[in-house]
Image (cartoon, grey):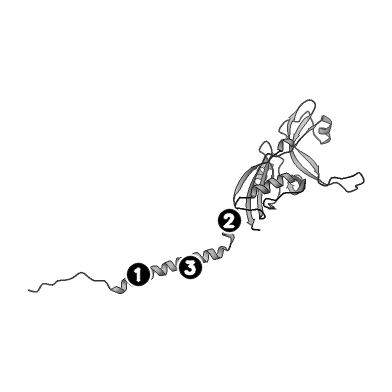
Amino acid sequence: MKSDKKGKPVGKKGDSTKSWAKIFLVLGCILFVGVMIITSLGTNWLVTMNPAKTGDTAIIDLTIRDSQGRPVLTTNARIFNTSYENGEVVWYTNPLTMAVNSTSTEMISPLPVYRYDYGEASFALFGDELSQISSALEGMKQGGSEKIVFENTDQLQRDMTPEQFAQMGGNITTAVPGDQLLLAFTTNPMLNMDDNSTPEYAIRTSVIAGKTGENVTVNYGYPSADISIVRLNRA
């Protein structure tokens, strides 16, 4: 009797070659897709990764708060509407465009603002505040947020007599510390008595910091601001 001996099946040499060819083909496709994605992104992805430096231009969202933590100026519509509905003296403005780490030479920079009950107005943003905001942008990345603390705000207050307070439309009898009110600042101060130009004003939300029988202390400085970079353009 003949015994049937069956050996193990031997694979063809070409099968291995085809497998490796498929692997290289898949890797090549993945690499191609990756290159296409990077190409489509352009240089924007580099902007989001690298921090802002001096000379860059940033479009920023901004919310400035008073000593009670209430927003007084914001580019955020949700914050504005919520604060407005709460009866707070808050102003809405568009996102700001500014150079990174620049110094403002203006004492007051009027900023176009809006309130539903007031309409359009100019907000008195101090040059020192602008400079501190601009300085804080350095090192931030596009999409990043940060809270900054303004310096020298303790000096931004004024004591008023009952008569002076009344001239502003206030009533010292009913005034309560924490109440908000508006102060007007001249944006083009007259340098001499012969200057016949019409003065222009910008308003600023202020807070009654204290009250005695003789005077009212009004604070028009702001302790902090929340900033975020919406878009960063390289120098």
CA distance for labels 2 and 3:
23 Å
- The image shows residue 92 at horizontal and vertical percentages of 70, 47
Please tell me which of labels 2 and 3 falls first in the chain.
3
Q: Which residue is mark 2?
A: 48
Q: Write down the quadrant of residue 70 in the picture.
A: top right
Which amino acid type corresponds to the residue marked 2 in the rendered image?
Thr
The mark found on residue 186 in the picture is: none
CA distance for labels 3 and 1:
20 Å
- The image shows residue 49 at horizontal and vertical percentages of 56, 55
Residue 174 higher or lower than 103, as above or below: above
- The image shows residue 153 at horizontal and vertical percentages of 71, 38
Q: Is residue 180 visible?
A: no
CA distance for labels 2 and 1:
41 Å
The mark found on residue 19 in the picture is: 1
Local SS, label 3: helix
Tag 2: Cα neighbours inside 10 Å, few (<14), some, or many (≥20)?
A: some
For the N terminus, the image quarter is bottom left
Of residues 163 and 221, the one drawn nearer to the viewer in this rendering: 221
The reply, left or right, for residue 155 in relation to residue 26 is right
Tag 1: Cα neighbours inside 10 Å, few (<14), some, or many (≥20)?
A: few
The furthest residue to the left: 1
